Image (tube, rainbow, N blue to C red):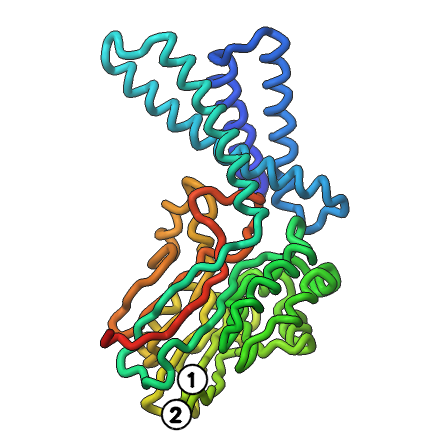
Amino acid sequence: MFRSRWTMPVILILLHVYVGVTLIPHLPLNDVGQLLAALLLALSCYLVPLGFRSRSLRMPWLAWAGLLAMGIFSSLAVLSLLRGVLIAVLMLFPGALSEAVTERSAEAVVGLVLLFTVLGVFNARRIANVVDVELPIEDLPEALEGFTIAQISDIHVGPTIHRSYISAIVQRVNRLEADVVAVTGDLVDGSVKQLAEHIQPLAELKGRYGEYVVTGNHEYYSGALEWVSHLKHMGLRVLLNEHVVIAHNGAELVLAGITDYSAGMFVPQHKSDPQAALQGAPNNVPKVLLAHQPRSAKLAAEAGFDVQLSGHTHGGQFWPWMHFVRFQQPWVAGIHRLGRLCVYISRGTGYWGPPIRFGAPSEITRIRLVSARR
């Protein structure tokens, strides 16, 4: 108990000490500048844990400060560690490590952190651009050629994403005039009581054949049963291991949705089940699955789906975390194949935690179904 409680705080303190000891002495700062840099690191050490508790903080500015500190120190720690590795390698070669290299590399770390932060905040806070994607389906009826699905995912309404941000997303989605609007999970980071007002604009989403939602893992951290009830009350159709049949131009399309891959750990009756989602569905028609996590793909392929639309990964959100997603998920973003199944993974429409996106821009996805014969 003691060990688990103190592991993260001790690691966080040690990382801050490491950054301070290895970086500050090599920056072009006088004594006052070095003292201020040390105080900023101490402030960071205080703020970063607040970022993890941002949902429970009553002062919005403190949540913003904690989450920004998380993102800034993440980049600072990673780049400082990489700099340490570089210096250790150079020390193996006589004459390779000079005072100039030590100083310039320290300045480069600070410069890159500033660049990542400024660009990252801009990319996160702007409203996601529309990304056009064509997904090929074998034996797609001609009547369904060009059927459009507007996908949004991983908005994470919460400490720094509020009503105005959601309203702008809804306006952009509705301008697409899609046949279906699909929301592939992780809408919220907080309770219905906290966020009902901010999520309300989603009730204005418009798809020709409806607006459909599946749960993500963050719904289960935030009271999934209450959120499902609230989303239904807003007029959104929540697909819990079930499907609908859409008739379009004389042809049929099955649109199914499953609960989050981990849902059964929180609500046993919500255990994710692609097979159950197809129970009673017509045969020999295209089948599209909404599934929050890409790792549902294996079971989706076995169930006989043609397309799976997912999110969850955020595309890694900001460097270097996109390189670690593959430890949990089979893919990070974009189009992938698993036998007959075509999987598309959105990089997400909002962001989680630090209001930073760098190297993984957000997206509103306009998906067109096309014949694989083309």
Amino acid type, callout 2: Pro
The relative height of residue 367 versus residue 105 in the rendered view (above or below) is below
Position of residue 110 in the picture relative to residue 195 (left or right): left
- The image quarter in which residue 296 lies: bottom left
Q: Nearer the viewer, residue 284 or 241?
A: 284
Mark 1–mark 2 CB contact (< 8 Å): yes
- Image x and y of residue 161, in percent: 64, 52
Which residue is label 2 attached to? 282
Which residue is label 1 attached to? 254
Q: Quadrant of the N terminus?
A: top right
Q: Is residue 300 visible?
A: no
Question: Mark 2, residues whose alpha carbon is within 10 Å: few (<14), some, or many (≥20)?
Answer: few
- Image x and y of residue 311, in percent: 46, 61
Who's the residue at 55% across and 10% down the image?
A: 29
How far apart, in angstroms, are the residues tagged by discs 1 and 2?
Answer: 8 Å
- Image x and y of residue 46, in percent: 65, 32
